[in-house]
Amino acid sequence: MGLATLIIGLIVFLGAHIFVTFRRHRERAIERLGKAGYRAVFAVVSLAGLALVIWGYAQYRVRDWVQIWSPPQFLRHVTIGLMLLAVIFATAAFIPSHIKTRLKHPLLAAVKTWAFAHLMSNGDLGSILLFGSFLAWAIFARIAAKRRGDIGATAAPPGWVNDAIVVALGIVIYLALGFVFHPVVIGVPVFGR
């Protein structure tokens, strides 16, 4: 049941995010619902999908685990290193910086890095579906943005103070995720197994 719930959650969550890339349909929905109504529906659908993904994956890990391949141990260290970059990229999405300008769409870069990193060190079916789906969506979303001419962040502020803030804040968030969130919420320690 957990695997089915995970798949339904992925369809709902990523389906809502794929819908956004179809701009004409999105504009029609905004015309019908109004901007606030559209945002409310999008938020409710996204949160429902995310809740299903989280609940389904948790149930899958307990009841439906299917191991496809066993990744070599060294890939775990590669994943940990890539996750630092993913968190810095995600942080850059919210602070104007040279990093944000260079990445153009830093949140998509963060999702791609996060998903790829986790695919390398997780060889079970649920993880392959979860992280593979997010990786495919992020690649699709980036291509869609490029095709519609959305070039992302174009101008960095003068100096490098914001970049230092992005990196420092990213490191703090990364450590919090690694030492607190991942072992407590996910149940898998990141550092010092």
Image (cartoon, grey):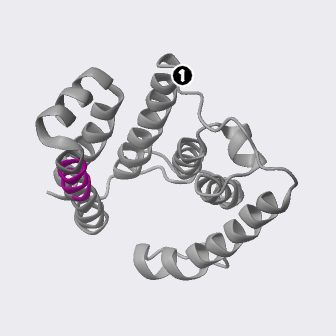
Left or right of residue 127, residue 16 in this image:
left
User: In the figure, residue 172 lies in which quadrant?
Assistant: bottom right
How many numbered discs? 1
Judge whether 180 appears above or below 131 on screen.
Answer: below
**Image location (x, y in percent) of residue 166:** 72, 62
- Where does label 1 land, which residue? 146
Left or right of residue 99, residue 68 in this image:
left
User: Which residue does the image show at 72% across and 58% down from the upper left?
Assistant: 81
User: Which residue does the image show at 41% across and 45% down from the upper left?
Assistant: 128
User: In the rendered image, which quarter contains the N terminus?
Assistant: bottom left
User: In the figure, residue 53 lies in which quadrant?
Assistant: bottom left
Q: Amino acid at mark 1?
A: Lys
Q: Main secondary structure of the magenta part?
A: helix
Judge whether 141 appears above or below 119 on screen.
Answer: above
User: Does the segment drawn in magenta span residue 97?
Assistant: no
**Image location (x, y in percent) of residue 120:** 58, 47
Q: Between 2 and 143, which is closer to the camera in this rendering?
A: 143
User: In the figure, residue 15 lies in which quadrant?
Assistant: top left
* Label 1: element kind: helix
**Image location (x, y in percent) of residue 60:** 26, 60
Q: Between 174 and 60, which is closer to the camera in this rendering?
A: 174
Which residue sits furthest top?
Answer: 147
Judge whether 105 appears above or below 174 on screen.
Answer: above
Which residue sits furthest right?
Answer: 159
User: Which residue does the image show at 44% across and 47% down from the upper left?
Assistant: 131
User: Which residue does the image show at 68% across and 39% down from the upper left?
Assistant: 103
**Image location (x, y in percent) of residue 27:** 25, 28
Residues in magenta, as a range? 39-47
Left or right of residue 135, residue 52 in this image:
left
User: Does the segment drawn in magenta span residue 43?
Assistant: yes
